[in-house]
Amino acid sequence: MSSSVQSVWARCLDSVSREVSGIAFQTWFQPLQPVSLKQEGDRVELLIELPSRFYHEWLDQHYTKLLHDTVNGVVGRAATVAYRIADRDETQAPRHETEDAAVVRRLPPSPGRNGSKKRQERVQNPVEPRPVPVQYAYAEHPLQKNYTFDTFVEGDCNRLARSAALAIAQRPGQTSFNPFLVYGGVGLGKTHLVQAIANYARTHGTTQKIVYLSSEQFTAEFVRSVKNHSIAEFTRYYRQTDLLIVDDVQFFGGKEKTQEEFFHIFNDLHQRNKQVVLCADRPPREIAGIEERLLSRFQWGLSADVQAPDLETRMAILRKKAALSGLVVPEEVIDFVAQRIRSNIRELEGALTRLFAHAKLQNRTIDLAFAYEALSDLLQESPKHVEIEDIQRMVADFYHLSPALICSRSRKREIVNARQVAIYLAKQFTTYTLEYIGNFFGGRDHSTVIHSCTMVENRMDVEPAFADEVNRLRRSINGAIS
Ligand code: ADP
Ligand code: MG
């Protein structure tokens, strides 16, 4: 595959990721594979491979216009988007179709770069979609090939999760980390890490049947199997896995029937030492709407969090991504981007992709001035930032205490209260790790930090006066850094 189709697609993904929710992006866009970018005279055609027909239906119903406009925007002229469906079922008869026959739907070129807002679709070359040969075709959620341990940068923010993941990949089902639950905020590498397990297990042959999918897909399939009266088949399929990875399990919340089915599958797999790996966007006990017995099972093995990366890790990630793209980015630009984009790794990556794209389009070298210009709209964050000491001081002043008391071992109620608030705000306003923050508060460990944050969040939900205090503090910290 030429690098130009890859880079065009990378830019499309970057743009789509700004338009749709994170989960929609992961579910519907990340699994798509760019195949070719053909140019004939004025016409450009981007061919994309979809994991299954189901994707085709879904994209068609929900994202036709978005995809179309995005591709036009990126290519800079009228382009056609064509789909083909991946041939993943090995039991299927060999394909005789030409590539063109496998293209199931084409979208016409848009009338102009910005297109008209009106839906402009029209079917050209309507070739009947090939029937999906296996019942659970879209359970075979394809893995991102580049989500490996090699491309995953280790830092304080993810060390435990990464080393546990590697141990699991080497000996699925044979460590005490079963299930293995990775949790943490959006864009911090959970999906990358758990797919690295699958990719490793696949390449090194450490286990047989590997299935990766999101809890939403699991739910959708379950619902479908109920409708089709094929629950037994559904269950059998999952019970046959040796390594089952379910991403974003928080979406099981409130789906009782699906949870029940998953509970039985989980028990069965666990009993037979099959590896289960789960991801969630928050600690298990904070996931709402999940039955207690399932929650407790989630915590049987090992739960490890991934945190926002610190500056050093952000720089290491940027260096790695630049190197992987074969581009030279001066260290001062790496430093600049890492200082300014702190929230999550996906945004960090987005900034770098943007830099590359602009540099290429404008034929410019990437230097500091260029980075500033190209990323100006992403850089609303203040270059100044707040340190934990500042937060401790502000909270201490607010409650008429001293910072030393906040960090002391005192269990007096008003001191514990101030300490928890300060810890919570330190977690919110800095990108330091839980360990680092805990250390700053009189050598406490990461579980104290998690506990404090949970306490504060819970109290804010039910005590308006307390929520008001925290918000006033938040505003004064905001004021101090802008
Ligand atoms: P999550 O599932 O936590 O929302 P993802 O795994 O989708 O996050 O990560 C978002 C993006 O950031 C991905 O492109 C991923 O490759 C990248 N990424 C996350 N963590 C790291 C890391 N430690 N090293 C390199 N890339 C990372
Ligand atoms: Mg994810």
Image (cartoon, grey):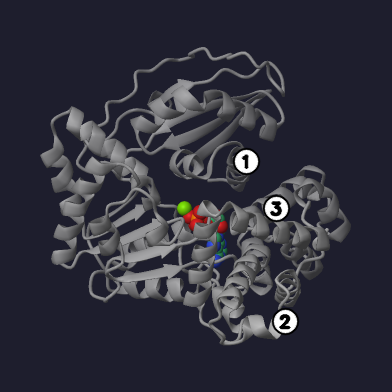
Is residue 371 at all visible to an observer of this figure?
yes
Q: Residues within 10 Å of mark 2 (few under 14, many from 20)?
A: some
Of the numbered discs 2 and 3, the one sitting upstream in the chain is 3
Q: Residues within 10 Å of mark 3 (few under 14, many from 20)?
A: many
> In the displayed image of the protein, which residue is found farthest to the right?
369
Label for residue 18? Answer: 1
Comparing marks 2 and 1, which lies closer to the viewer?
2
Comparing marks 2 and 3, which lies closer to the viewer?
2
Label for residue 351? Answer: 3
List x then y, in percent, for residue 99: 41, 30
> Residue at horizontal 57%, vertical 79%?
438
Q: Is 325 drawn above or below residue 398 in the view shown?
A: above
SS label for mark 3: helix
Q: Is 41 drawn above or below residue 292 in the view shown?
A: above
Q: Amino acid at mark 2?
A: Ser
SS label for mark 1: helix
List x then y, in percent, for residue 449: 53, 73
SS label for mark 2: loop
* Quarter of the image with the C terminus in it: bottom right
Q: Is mark 1 within 8 Å of ligand 1?
A: no
List x then y, in percent, for residue 171: 27, 73
Give 352 or 269, whichever is nearer the viewer: 269
Q: Is 293 drawn above or below residue 37 in the view shown?
A: below
Q: For this view, does 260 lie left or right of residue 424?
A: left
Q: Amino acid at mark 1?
A: Arg
> Residue at horizontal 45%, vertical 72%?
162
Q: Amino acid at mark 3?
A: Ala
Proximity of marks 2 and 1: CB atoms separated by less than 8 Å: no
